[in-house]
Image (tube, helix red, strand yellow):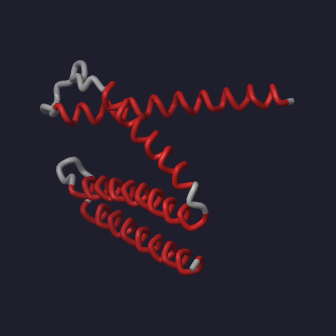
Amino acid sequence: MGNKVIDIAKYASWCILGVGVLIVLIGVIMGFDASNAVAIDLMLYWSYALIGIALCAIVVLGLFLAAKNDVNQLKTIGIVVGGGLLLVLIAWLLAPASAPLAYNGPAVTHSDLKLTDTILNLTYIAGCASILAVVFSVVWNRVRK
């Protein structure tokens, strides 16, 4: 069973890499100038797809392996996924969706502003959490010694 999963993951990785290379080649052939944004849009959509594939793989494979190895790990995975969803919800609720200062470009919708502010809030939360984790680990290692 383990070798089949590894083989499937290997072939899926090669397929994903092949599609990525194909999209880059299409972009090189079409060009990346501002008047022809098709190549850039293709790359952005592919990156969105890769993020979705990664998240689904983590959750689905995590659930599958946890159920196979130890059913009690499902509770831990549920807590982690729930905590991640709670962080996204908090970041979304804190997002002001205000228009950027001194912006003279085309009009931006409220939902775009809300999404951008949510992602910025998530970035701030992740950055602060990583700094706190480093400080905590240094202090914890000093206390233990």
Up-down relation of residue 110 to residue 47 (above or below):
above
Q: Nearer the viewer, residue 70 or 61?
A: 70
Residue at the location (42% across, 55% down)?
Answer: 55
Q: Report whether 110 appears left or right of 70.
A: left
Residue at the location (54% across, 80% down)?
Answer: 4
Up-down relation of residue 78 to residue 109 (above or below):
below
Indicate the position of residue 94 as horizontal and vertical percent values. Answer: 33, 24
Indicate the position of residue 129 as horizontal and vertical percent values. Answer: 54, 31
Up-down relation of residue 58 to residue 11 (above or below):
above
Tell me the quadrant of the picture where the C terminus can be found. top right
Indicate the position of residue 83 as horizontal and vertical percent values. Answer: 46, 39
Residue at the location (32% across, 32% down)?
Answer: 92
Tell me the quadrant of the picture where the N terminus can be found. bottom right
Indicate the position of residue 99 as horizontal and vertical percent values. Answer: 21, 23
Quarter-wise, where is residue 103 in the image? Answer: top left
Q: Residue furthest right?
A: 145
